[in-house]
Amino acid sequence: MKCDSCQEEETWLEIIGNQYICHKCMQKNKDMGFLFRTNIEIFKRVMKKLKPKDYQEYTLIAKEQIEKAVPDLKKFGIKLN
């Protein structure tokens, strides 16, 4: 399938809102990309709470929004820069 952001052919895509996004494009949001690489369960919890409608809204997720959605990040050993 093709990534809706970069249009490259990928075998594994994530669904963000109503779009299919590759892992390379997901890394463009620094904080969410870090969560995706370190702890996929926390990443999914943040996505479930914030519910971005599309990739554009996903890229605008800030560190403060993540910390508000999951206040116990330090309990899991995750420190956002």
Image (cartoon, grey):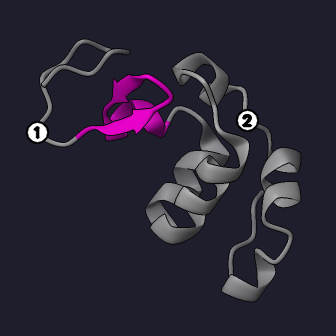
User: Which amino acid type is marked by label 2?
Assistant: Ile
| Label annotation for residue 71 | none
Neighbours of disc 1 within 10 Å: few (<14), some (14-19), many (20+): few
Q: Is residue 23 above or below residue 72?
A: above
Does residue 39 show up? no
Q: What element carries label 1?
A: loop
| The C terminus lies in quadrant | bottom right
Q: Is residue 16 above or below residue 75?
A: above
Q: In this view, does 37 lie above or below 17?
A: below
Which residue is rendered at x = 19% and y = 43% of the image? 12
Q: How many marks?
A: 2
Q: Is residue 33 left or right of residue 50?
A: left
Q: In this view, does 44 lie to the left or right of 57?
A: left
Q: Is residue 60 above or below residue 34?
A: above
| The N terminus lies in quadrant | top left
- Whether residue 48 appears in magenta in the rendering, the answer is no
Q: Distance between the residues labelled 1 and 2?
A: 26 Å
Q: Is mark 2 on a helix, strand or loop?
A: loop
The residue indicated by pointer 2 is: 61
Give x and y (percent) for residue 60: 72, 26
The residue indicated by pointer 1 is: 11
Which residue is rendered at x = 31% and y = 33% of the image? 22
Q: Give the range drawn in magenta.
A: 13-27
Does residue 78 show up? yes
Which residue is rendered at x = 76% and y = 87% of the image? 75
Give x and y (percent) for residue 73: 76, 74
User: Which amino acid type is marked by label 1?
Assistant: Thr
Q: Is residue 57 left or right of residue 28?
A: right
Q: In this view, does 34 lie to the left or right of 6?
A: right
Which residue is rendered at x = 26% and y = 38% of the image? 13
